[in-house]
Image (tube, rainbow, N blue to C red):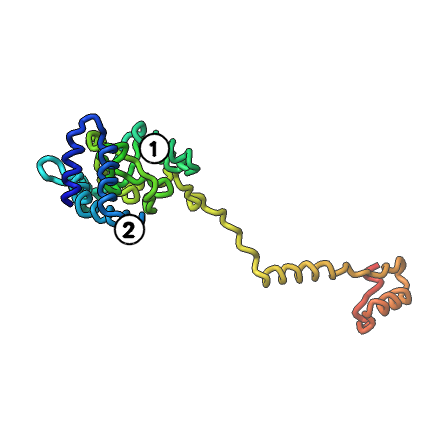
Amino acid sequence: MENINSTNNQLHNEDSMNTTDLLIQALSAHFNDNPTNFTSYRNSVDKLLREHIKPMTSRSGKSADGDDWKSQVKQRFSGRGAKWVFVSLEQIESTLVNLESTGIDCTSYRKFTTEHGKAWIRFSAPRINNGSQSAAFEVRTEGATKDHPKQLHYIPLTEIESCNQMPGTPKSLKLEEDSAPVTNDMSKKPKKKKDPQPASNLSSLADSINDELSQEEPELSELPESADPEEWSAFLEAEGLTDLDDSDVDFDENF
């Protein structure tokens, strides 16, 4: 380690060299003092990085006053229902275009958000995006109840006030339901059908018609044109009236 310190002191005096060149020279000097194979040397360098460099990176998320900005972002969106926020359609548009360029269908999401004039996103985690401390939000294009961990919209902390906390989840607010009215098929009453005639009444009616049709007008023999008793006797016999006594018929009186 003494060799490293002496080398570092020497290199620090060379202002014309950049930090990358300094690092290469320091590693070369360290390797010359500790010659070994590449794998062993890399492992020893990894150990030095973990001991001396990693603690520096763990403090990178803290501000000058010692507060962790990531914890502050998480705290802002912690609690029941606090993760859902509204953003403007203009603000979400570039993210939707990027998602669609990768083959993601945003049709339904665009439809619902356009109807309400604003978009809804769910807080995921604090992230560094393009070198800026940001809050990452899920854009749930396939429904608010389904996780979309890889579909993220980033809002820099300097613009975090542009989002507004929602009073509830998209499901509870019914933001992703069609607003078309449901047709009430029960509004029209079906026409009342006439009760059919009882079978017994139809049968009686048919019997009555048949009886009337079966009754033929009786055929009567022609009456004798004269008052001859013999002709009348023959007529009466033909009509089945021969049981009458002759005294009951007075031909002379009738003709």
Is residue 221 or residue 254 the one in the foreground?
Answer: 221
Tell me if I can see residue 92 in this picture: yes
Look at 17% across and 41% down and name the residue there. Answer: 4
Image coords of residue 56 (percent x, y): 16, 41
Image coords of residue 49 (percent x, y): 21, 45
Q: Mark 2: which secondary structure?
A: helix
Q: Quadrant of residue 116?
A: top left
> Alpha carbon of mark 1 to alpha carbon of mark 2: how far?
45 Å
Image coords of residue 119 (percent x, y): 30, 34
Q: Quadrant of residue 200?
A: bottom right
Q: Residues within 10 Å of mark 1 (few under 14, many from 20)?
A: some
Look at 14% across and 35% down and name the residue there. Answer: 9
Tell me if I can see residue 69 in this picture: no
Q: Mark 1: which secondary structure?
A: helix
**Sequence-wise first label, 1 or 2:** 2
Residue type at numbered disc 1: Thr
Image coords of residue 89 (percent x, y): 31, 29
Residue 16 vs residue 117: left or right?
left
Circle 1 sits on which residue?
95
Circle 2 sits on which residue?
40
The quadrant in which the C terminus is found is: bottom right
Residue type at numbered disc 2: Ser
Q: Is residue 211 above or below residue 131?
A: below
Q: Is residue 100 above or below residue 225?
A: above
Is residue 79 or residue 114 the one in the foreground?
Answer: 79
The quadrant in which the N terminus is found is: top left
